Amino acid sequence: MNPLASPHGLTSDQESVVFIVDDDESVRRALSNLFQSVGLQVQEFGSAAELLHSKLPDVASCLVLDIRLPGLSGLDLQLELTRADIHIPIIFMTGHGDIPMSVRAMKGGAIDFLTKPFRDQDMLDSVMTAIKRDRERREAQKAVTGLREHFETLTEREREVLALVAAGLMNKQIAARIGVAEITVKIHRGRVMKKMGAKSLADLVRMAEMIGIRRP
Amino acid sequence: MNPLASPHGLTSDQESVVFIVDDDESVRRALSNLFQSVGLQVQEFGSAAELLHSKLPDVASCLVLDIRLPGLSGLDLQLELTRADIHIPIIFMTGHGDIPMSVRAMKGGAIDFLTKPFRDQDMLDSVMTAIKRDRERREAQKAVTGLREHFETLTEREREVLALVAAGLMNKQIAARIGVAEITVKIHRGRVMKKMGAKSLADLVRMAEMIGIRRP
DNA sequence: GGGCGAGAAACCTAAGTATGATTCCCCCCT
DNA sequence: AGGGGGGAATCATACTTAGGTTTCTCGCCC
């Protein structure tokens, strides 16, 4: 049997969690069962504050959120998370929502907005989509973060040289621009390549693009 | 007075059109007046088919679409346009919509989904956002298209060399890979630079990224 | 003192630019 | 049919410029 398959026969998405936020325990229980039945891990919260005060595991995940919550509403929570630069995909559900609410949620980047009662399969589809998106976002993020860490080890001069190299200037032009000898530029340049772990100039240019280095 | 300002005192967005699709002429008339009052150009259609059969001007624009239309519905039209790879921003309006409709529209990339009656200012805000987005999309598209045109002028060999150069290989490595002498690679490479209009290797690498050249 | 920036000298490799020549293939004209 | 032109690809030779490394030396500042 495929070791990646859950005991239920569906593939478990290697480390992924669904966070459920709903003040109704019976709803949480039902959703938990649903998600666990397909091999997903689950974590339950009774309010937005509860979720905000807990530290979320660093794995692909998504939020299943009731619009109406005690304290912060679901939409408020979405806004808070966005402001905190936490971009976990959100699936909203509601029994008494309206169109402006759903539009606001979707504009805010929500994956879906389900009206109760919804079909289990619809919820599962949305959760799977959300987790897939989160995994992709995390992978992209991880690459950029790694690059930024390398970038942090550069000295001011080296960053300056990196920017000019990535802009396509020749060593002698860079030297003239920053007022040093060409040989000095070569030395900085070599160190930049080593510190950034670039195996070629093409590599370095792509790295500069990824961490958003603007031409000076 | 600022030559970019319209006679109404609001800045006219240099060449931009709003396409209105609604089967109710009085609605179209009212919207036309609204948009023209802020210096926007307008084009009206009574049905989805009417719009699909007309050739749209090549300027920043957006669609204001009633959900309920004779023939193809607004959502159907959105789907058709997406399938035809036409990504003009869409603003929906409806008097009798529901949440699933709005969610479907937003998932499909709509800018907004307004319920009648809406405030004029809300519609104008959405239209401005939509046109701004379209202008940005067009500019990005134009750059890529220009690059692709240059790419089309390359011979097979030159494209091969371009891909390997962008991947960061040295001339001698490229030569070995494709089974020619290093000098030949240099010649191809020089021609690639000229034909693509790249002023530096960094330039060329970015171009390759933009037109989506995958490392072989 | 150690990290950082700057630089000199020497040396080597990589890249880029002619010039010329050959071959192959395709198309057009006589 | 035959001939010519031209684009494309290939390679050689020769030369110039750019890029990169190593070693060593200063000066500065914390």
Image (cartoon, coloured by chain):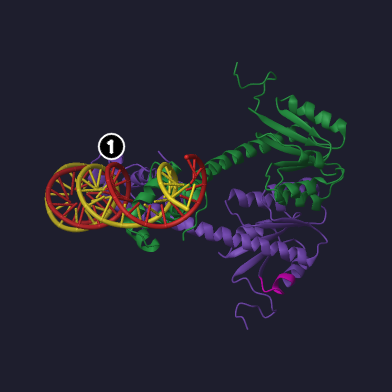
Chain colours: A purple, B green, C red, D yellow
Residue A175 shown left or right of residue A59 in the figure: left
Residue drawn 63% across the image and 67% down it: A17
Q: Is residue B53 left or right of residue D27?
A: right
Asked if the stretch drawn in magenta spans residue A39, the answer is: yes
- Observer-nearest residue: A75 or B172? B172
Q: Position of residue D24 (x, y in %)?
A: 12, 54
Q: Residue furthest top?
A: B1
Q: Is residue C13 above or below residue B41?
A: below
Provide residue A196's location: percent of width, then percent of height. Answer: 37, 55
Tell me if B209 is positioned left or right of B88 in this view: left
Q: Is residue B157 visible?
A: yes
Residue visible at 61% across and 68% down in the picture: A16
At x 64%, y 73%, the residue is A12
Judging by the rendered image, the residue that carries numbered circle 1 is A176
Name the one closer to the observer, A194 or A52.
A194
Magenta-colored span: A34-40
Q: Give the residue drawn at x 67%, y 60%.
A: A63
In this rendering, the answer to whether C1 lies above or below A27 is above
A90 drawn magenta: no
- Please state, as top left, top right, bottom left or bottom right, where the C terminus of chain A lies in the image: top left
